Image: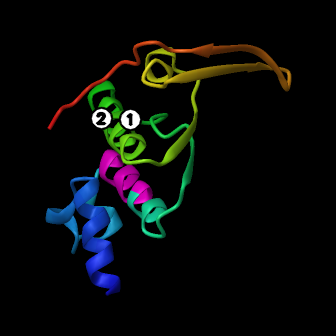
Amino acid sequence: MRNEKAMEVLEKVSLTDRSHHKPNELSGGQCQRVAIARALVNDPSIILADEPTGNLDTKTSYEIMDIFGKIHSSGNTVVLVTHEEDIARHSHRIIRLRDGEVETDEKVEQPTVVHLN
């Protein structure tokens, strides 16, 4: 059962082909996908992601945001912290904080959607 669930979440993040690799055999983007899979394995209703694209190139960042978009579409809430405006634009709502206070709270009418697969 555990192995089946693990393979199910690895499929959601497109890593079934790397399931038997060790962490040092994975790229930064693949490691980030593993982190997302680990978060999904217990079927959470909310996922908290702190700078999930911080150390990734643009293409890989958009791949990660595509995964978060699919997760959101399947009914999960994703709370993402980022300093990158283009990454924030993938969201349905952007709340900007300054010195611990809400500076702006903006609903995004048309979030950026990138489907790479």
* Tags 2 and 1 touching, CB below 8 Å: yes
Q: Which residue occupies the foreground of this view, 98 or 76?
A: 76
In the rendered image, the residue lying farthest to the front is 75
Q: Which residue is mark 2?
A: 60
Q: Which residue occupies the foreground of this view, 13 or 55?
A: 13
**Could you tell me what secondary structure mostly forms the magenta stretch?**
helix
Label count reads: 2
Q: Does the magenta-highlighted stretch encompass residue 40?
A: no
On the image, the x and y values in percent for residue 83 come to: 58, 23
Q: Amino acid at mark 2?
A: Thr
**What residue do we see at 37% from left, 55% from top?**
31
**What residue do we see at 48% from left, 48% from top?**
76
Is 52 positioned to the left or the right of 102 in the image? left
Q: Which residue is mark 1?
A: 56
**What residue do we see at 52% from left, 20% from top?**
84
Where are the magenta residues, as a range? 28-36
The N terminus lies in quadrant:
bottom left
The numbered dot on residue 6 is none
Location of residue 19 with respect to 15 vertically, above or below: below
